[in-house]
Image (cartoon, helix red, strand yellow):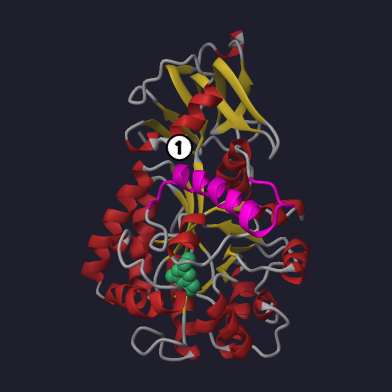
Amino acid sequence: MANSFVLKGNIIYSVSLEELKEVVNGYIVVIDGKSEGVFTSLDEKYKALHLYDYKDALIVPGLIDLHIHAPQFGFRGMALDLELMEWLEKYTFPEEAKFSEIEYAEKAYSIFVDALRKSATTRLVVFASRHREATVLLMDKLERSGLISYVGKVNMDRLAPSPIKEESAEVSEKETRLWLDEIRGRYKNTKPILTPRFVPSVSDSLMGKLELIRDEYDLPVQSHLSENPNEIELVKELAPYSRFYGDAYNHFNLFGGNNNKCIMAHCVYSKEEEIALMAKNHVTVAHCPESNENLSSGLAPIRKFLDSSISVGLGSDIGAGTTESIFFALTEAIRVSKMYWRLVDDRYKPLSFKEAFFLATMGGGKFFGNVGSFMKGYDFDALVLSDENLPSPLELSPSERLERFCYLRGDEKGIKAKFVNGVKLF
Ligand code: GUN
Ligand code: FE
């Protein structure tokens, strides 16, 4: 059978927020790209399958990046001295404007996709720029990479000067439809996602048009929510009909609900009413801790979301985040949750390592289906990790080795193999 094989090694995976399983010298059986389960010994009936023996290495599910801006990859690690609105105006919008030139997009997106292919990320949800041609180019490259992604051509018809913003709501709508028609049926692993940039960038008229497109093309939606105090004040002015930020999306039915899939990035300042609507509408939170530190945005109340049964995954938020490493994001999520507990509200206890690992795998994976674990029936996404470059005098269990690997940035040298949906990328 195609995509059927066995992996041997030290296997670690989440089964819930509370439980991380580990099996020393175990086997994962993969049939037709899906996990059959994890075993301590190999049943006779699987012995004919090809065996990848990874010996003492660690085997974990692939990591999920729920929020990353592909056109911002070029200026990551720079220009982080401002808050959100000024950062967008001074650095981000001018950089994204360059993607009107396809030669620049070709160069920048080659670098981006190459880095993501080598990274710990197996699936990602991506903001492109507002440019149709460059967005299709990015999708072509992502499809060839073997990664699985949702990609959005950004909609933005206000706030910035032309030609950074789109000319009008009508032009934005037309370009979006042309984009969706052009890519229809073109990819196996690369899907479109509707991407109104955020309320300040999208007029009411355009929001209304996007709702119709979402229904016509049956698309998920991604955007930004309650990231920064100045942004939130602006949304109050621009959407006087809204009771809170998320209500401005909900006004146009672009905030989940009715089985419409929706990811909102950041949610740093989400309060009770907003959290209740997110829970009711099954909105997924993309938590981007490093970005929230770099832009002085704040400390997101992740424990509150988890207590409200809201799905939470992690995002690198390149270029407000500096690295595509979701291993780094998961350690940042722990640190930020400790600061929240210490500085904001000590009723909300910090995330543990196993909880943060769940967010990086199953938390984000849920957006893609049965993804992010090795339980039977899950799509087989996996990383084989070597910590040979991080010697220790201690006798360590697999989960201790994994924790150390995350904190010591073992992924810079230690990703030895990567599988996405049952396909070995390297
Ligand atoms: N809000 C609107 N656009 C952006 C963006 O590009 N990055 C971040 N962090 N927040 C945004
Ligand atoms: Fe973002």
Out of 350 and 289, give the one closest to the viewer.
350
Out of 322 and 361, give the one closest to the viewer.
322
Residue 281 sits in quarter: bottom right
Out of 135 and 405, give the one closest to the viewer.
405
Residue occupying image coordinates x 61% and y 10%: 43
Q: Which residue is mark 1?
A: 407
Residue occupying image coordinates x 55% and y 18%: 27
Amino acid carrying mark 1 in the image:
Tyr
Tell me if 151 is positioned left or right of 286 in this view. Answer: left
The relative height of residue 304 versus residue 399 in the rendered view (above or below) is below
**Can residue 324 be found in the magenta stretch?**
yes
Q: Locate residue 120, reporting x and y percent.
A: 42, 41
The relative height of residue 168 versus residue 12 in the rendered view (above or below) is below
Q: Locate residue 118, reporting x and y percent.
A: 34, 42
Q: Which residues are magenta?
A: 323-350
**Can residue 233 be found in the magenta stretch?**
no
Tell me if 324 is positioned left or right of 3 in this view. Answer: left
Magenta residues, dominant SS class: helix
Q: Locate residue 126, reporting x and y percent.
A: 46, 60
- In the rendered image, the quadrant that contains the C terminus is top left
Q: Is residue 343 visible?
A: yes
Q: Is residue 130 visible?
A: no
Q: Residue furthest front?
A: 343
Q: Is mark 1 within 8 Å of ligand 1?
A: no
The relative height of residue 198 versus residue 183 in the rendered view (above or below) is below
Residue 178 sits in quarter: bottom left
For label 1, the crowd category at 10 Å Cα-Cα, with few meaning under 14, some 14 to 19 and many 20 or more, is some
Secondary structure of the residue carrying numbered label 1: helix
